[in-house]
Image: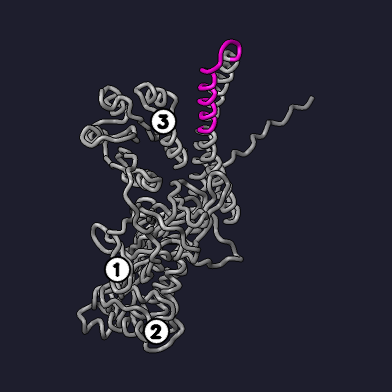
Amino acid sequence: MPAEPPATAAPALSEGLPVRVSAQKLDALLARSGELRVAGLRMEGRVESLEAVNEELSQLRQRLKGPEALVARRLETRLAQLGRALAADRRTLLQASGGLDEEVRRARTLPFAEGCAGLERGARDLARAAGKQVRLDVVGGALELDRSLLQGLREPLLHLMRNAVSHGLETPEERLAAGKPEEGRVVLSARLRGGRVQVVVEDDGRGLHLESIRHKARERGLPVLDDAGDVRLIFMPGLSTASTVTNVSGRGVGLDVVRSQVEALRGNVDVSFRPGQGTRFVMDVPLTLSTLRVLLVMVTGQTFAVASESVERLVRLEPGDVRRVEGRQLWAGPDALVPLATLSEVLGLPASAPRPHPSALVLGAGELHAVLGVDEIVAEQEVLIRGLGARIRRARHVSGVAVLPDGRVAPLLNAPSLVRAAEGRTTAAGLFPAPVAASARLRVLLADDSMTTRALEQSILEAAGYQVLVCSDGQEAWERLQREGADVLVSDVEMPRMDGFSLTEAVRGSPRFGRLPVVLVTARSTPEDKARGLQVGASAYLVKSAFDQTHLLETLRQLL
């Protein structure tokens, strides 16, 4: 029998072999990973609901006797097991979806230098046509950014490069006369700042002519403030200081487009300059465009989302905090007077009923700020972001749609657009109700070391009619309780000097405050933490991951 031929080994697959994947497929994969992440967040609420049912069953069991109590105990045990299993599945899902999300994002990234490809040649051609010399440098070119973000920044970068060469840089003769090198310089740079990207376009040219900008603005009937802020007028539609019209300047377009396109990326753009030394444009945009941490607010029965990073603080408006200056209504902040309006009037919605202490958001967009009154501050959540779609190319003050963990959707508001709209508006006289006789209010002592959480809970409690004493840690809360008293204590657990568990133990050990209701609101969600909280004497234990203002208010109503 002939010998068998030697077996041929299968060729080894190269692990480093590149694979081409279309951008559309990566976009679809990112959308699916975002939906998985939202599903994981939705499961947090399911876990809390199951635990609430188990607690109700435990209370029912205590009122039962005989065989019925045994049945209830078995059900309680099974529900507890199911709750632990669901919590474990939630953690697994969040870990898997988070890992998938990270891998997809990494596959979608490109170096910043690729987003600047072709701009150097375009700058040289434009300069040559204008009799100028230019060198374009890219700083931070190796920084990896999301492909969609780079694509969205492409047009703004092109406009700003053209603006720098056409308006900013001088001719070689002018530069030599000013003591500068003949060759002008334009620098494109990118750097990370937390969860955001700062993209800068700067030149070493003549800077901006502020008086010319003001003159053109007055001709168009735009408000001129005669201060440094007037430089931002160059972003207004149709405003151009070019003396002649060419294919790249004098048409009144470009910088308005830059602002619109950057804001479509949920970012903002600002400008500064030094006469005779150059101009600097700064575009600040989020690192990711698919998910976002938002603050949910209610206005005239509708829910809206505002990026948390745009909210500098939450405040309760008081009549004494409002000033009127030249017909404009302003909020007297700690450092400056800030334009004040209601979100309903900015959005063109019916005015809400006046409230004694209306809630408001202090929004920041670059150097600009505004205070917007809202009916209710609902919660802070991570949401999935979707675009408006091709049929709705541009909705006023709306940059996208936020998909909430429970499946509902809310318009994502454009913070820079809201800030600009608030300037110059006068809020209706009905912002505050007519004065009424003072009445006794229940006093809540609130302790939390997180300024954002503290402000959110204070806003919710004061809107419900409570008088709130705010403390930044447990020791301060204990001292104020002994000094001023309270009807209920709402406290975080993890705080400096004295944590929430120790604070609760101190309250329970006090002859004066031993029966004071204590509500712990904390990020600690394990059964062991909850058991310890109740063991030291907490009247109620609420988890921040599933925080809902209705839970807090209903808990207080039952305790008081």
Query: In the image as oriented, which residue stretches furthest toward the top?
Result: 66
154 horizontally vs 426: left or right: right
Quadrant occupied by the N terminus: top right
* Residue farthest to the bottom, as pictured: 244
Labels 1 & 3 near each other (Cβ < 8 A): no
Percent of width and height locating residue 203: 31, 72
Q: Could you say whether the residue bearing mark 3 is in a helix, strand or loop?
A: strand
Q: Residues within 10 Å of mark 1 (few under 14, many from 20)?
A: some
Magenta stretch bounds: 48-68
Q: Residue at x 34, y 57 (%)?
A: 435
Instruction: Please name the residue that numbered disc 1 is placed on.
Output: 324
Q: Nearer the viewer, residue 341 or 122?
A: 341
Q: Which mark is residue 34?
A: none
Residue in the picture at 58% in, 46% down = 407
Of all residues, the one furthest to the front in this rendering is 437
Residue picked out by circle 3: 541
Q: How many tags in the picture?
A: 3
Q: Nearer the viewer, residue 289 or 27?
A: 289
Decide: is 364 above or below 550.
Answer: below
Q: Earlier in the sequence, mark 3 or mark 2?
A: 2
The answer to whether residue 76 is above or below residue 500 is above
Residue kind at label 1, given as amino acid type: Arg
Kind of residue indicated by mark 2: Arg
Q: What whole-number distance in Å separates the C-alpha atoms at marks 1 and 3?
A: 44 Å
* Quarter of the picture holding the C terminus: top left
In which quarter of the view is residue 262 placed?
A: bottom left
Q: Which residue is mark 2?
A: 220
Q: Secondary structure at mark 2?
A: loop
Task: Please indicate whether residue 447 sits to the left or right of residue 483 in the image.
Answer: right
**Magenta part, dominant SS:** helix
Q: Earlier in the sequence, mark 1 or mark 2?
A: 2
